[in-house]
Amino acid sequence: MTLFHVIILAIVQGFAELLPISSSAHVIVAEELMGMNPAAPQMTLLLVMLHTGTMFAVIVYFWNRWRRAYFQSVAQFRKFAIAVIFATFLTGLIGGGLIEGIEHVLFRNQAHAWVEQLFGHLNLIAPALAAGGILILAAGLLEKRQRGANPGAKPGASSEMTMKQTGIIGAVQGLCLPFRGFSRSGATISAGMLSGVAKARAEDFSFALAVAITPAAIARELYRLIQMQHIHHGTRLAFEVLPSVLGAFFAFLAGLVALKWLSRWLESGRWYIFGIYCLFAACVVGYLYHAGF
């Protein structure tokens, strides 16, 4: 993996992260097209670090909105913190359970089995993209119908979230963890919209949850790299991690550029278009699989 490869993947990640189209699926397809193994420990760590880079870009973009929504008072922050903890707990419970099930049932005859071994399977990414596309399409059509019924109002029953709605979003996020292609942001925002949350609030909360789970994802991939590569020296670990750190930096820059270009367009609505795109992308990925990638 060269610096050129890292920059290309960072650009793909940076421009796809803000969109609910599964940036992971796009990065993995790019890796396949460049002849890389997306399931290799170095590549799964790079994928997580690319997400980390765009996560910081998202923090820069969403910070003022989060401050207005969650940090105006102690009571407001306490409610937000409880919601994040509850949703993240459900994410860990459901996502962790699925990962454990896959690793200990599907890979029960393999030593050192990891769910990341599935990440290079385009035949699994294609249906995951389709499933995410259907969910986004359903939420988008509901949004469109609400706009048609009341053109002067913003879609969504309320900008506030109940614990039930918070739990639904956290649970759906857990379903996304083992499957590349099932867009985390697309699924969680759509689940919030379908449960009656205003899209803007669902977006804010979805990306806040991403910030909460990213450190655990980095720790998991570092542990996997150390175990799979039998790394016992800090110097070698630093050498293995360096491309991922560079990737995070370039993804941060690409994410900032993408946010500047895409933010106004994203706020205009038409959520269902992303569902149509995901269904189209599923067909493309399916074709690439049958073509031998």
Image (tube, helix red, strand yellow):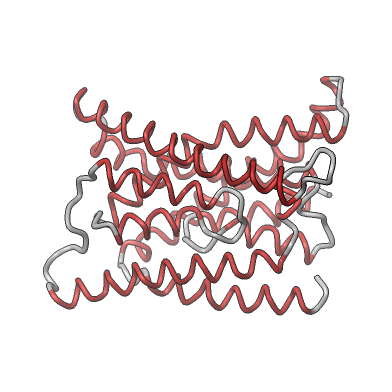
Horizontal arrangement in the rendering, residue 96 relative to residue 83 (left or right): right
Residue 174 spot, x, y in % from top left: 50, 46
Residue 152 spot, x, y in % from top left: 11, 69
Residue 78 spot, x, y in % from top left: 26, 26
Residue 190 spot, x, y in % from top left: 37, 60
70 vs 158: above or below: above
291 vs 160: above or below: below
- The residue positioned 83% from the left and 74% from the top of the image is 292
Q: Quadrant of residue 32?
A: bottom right
- The residue positioned 67% from the left and 73% from the top of the image is 285
- Name the foreground residue: 266 vs 81: 81
Q: Quadrant of residue 74?
A: top left
- Name the foreground residue: 27 vs 132: 132
- The residue positioned 59% from the left and 46% from the top of the image is 98
Horizontal arrangement in the rendering, residue 72 relative to residue 108 (left or right): left
280 vs 161: above or below: below
216 vs 10: above or below: above
- The residue positioned 80% from the left and 70% from the top of the image is 293
Q: How many marks?
A: 0
Residue furthest top as drawn? 233
Horizontal arrangement in the rendering, residue 30 relative to residue 35 (left or right): left
